[in-house]
Every structure is written in structure tokens, then in C-alpha cells.
Image (cartoon, grey):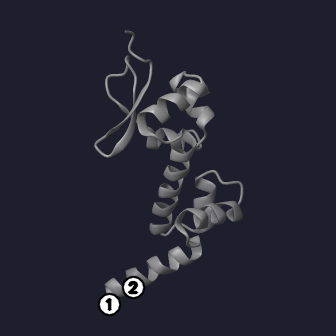
Amino acid sequence: MKRPELQIAYRNGRVVAIRPREPEPMPLGPIARETGFKVSKMCAVFHVSDRQFHRTFNDSLGISPKDWLRRERMVQARQLLMEGLPIKEAASELGFPSTKDFSREFQNFYEVSPTDFQRRQDAARNQRLE
């Protein structure tokens, strides 16, 4: 049986793409950021159709690429805010069309607004310093 052109798997706690001609698995997190968290652009990177990418992703991880990208984007958003990046800059860096869209997505995902999240982070940081 022919080996698939693309495999998606968890390796060492990270989601990776495995291609027959690549010597090492390719972590999908950095690729997601480079492609603006767009499924269609990730398909282009791997030279596979949208349908094939969805099927491979769902079969391998039990989650759609869109859902995984949303989660990956929010994990990155949380990290940027924890590092103290202003909300507007985090929204821009992650490719959101507006701060409002970023805030809505963050709130829906984490059930806390980005502003409140940063306030809590600042309070926790200040408490540790005391």
C-alpha cells in the first residue's frame, strides 16, 4: 500500500506533519503562524487539497484543522498577553482584522476578556514580587 503523502500526529506534545520526503517531522504551530492561521494556506504549504488535509487531520487527531487552528491561535494569544504585549499589538500579530474581533474570540475561548486576563496576570505578578 502506498504511504500517504501527509500524516498528522502528536510527537512530544506537539502536533506535527510527517511527509515521506522530509527527514524530520514539521511542527504545525510555527507553520500555522506563518500562514496566518488559514487552512487554505496550510494546504498550499503541504501541497494537498483542502479535502485531503481535513480528512487527514480529522482521522489523525479527531479534530478539524479549523478547530485546531483556532485553539492554536488562542494559545498564542494567551502567551503574547502573558508576555505583556498590548492587546492591539497581539490582535495585529495574530492576524485579527480588529481588536474587537480579537477580544470577542479571546472572550469566547477563555471566558475572560483580554483586558481582565492581563489585569489578573499583572496582579499575580505583583503579588509574587511582594
Please report the residue visible at 62 percent of the width from the left and 60 percent of the height from the top.
Answer: 105
Q: Count the marks: how many?
A: 2
Amino acid bearing label 1? Glu
Disc 1 marks which residue?
130
- The image quarter containing residue 47 is top right
Above or below, comparing residue 66 to residue 56 in the picture: below
- Measuring from the top left, give residue 72's x and y in whole percent: 49, 50
Q: Residue at x 50, y 66 (%)?
A: 81
Q: Quadrant of the N terminus?
A: top left
User: For this rendering, which residue is in front, 83 or 118?
Assistant: 118
Residue 67, given in percent of the width and then of the height, sits at 55, 46
Hey, what amino acid is under mark 2? Answer: Asn
Q: On the picture, is 118 further left or further right than 97? A: left
Numbered disc 2: secondary structure: helix
Q: Are marks 2 and 1 in contact (CB under 8 Å)?
A: yes
Please tell me the numbered disc located at residue 126: 2
Where's residue 99, x and y in %? Answer: 68, 63
Label 2, label 1: how far apart the Cα atoms are: 6 Å
Which residue corresponds to the image point at 51% horizontal and 45% vertical from the top-left?
A: 68
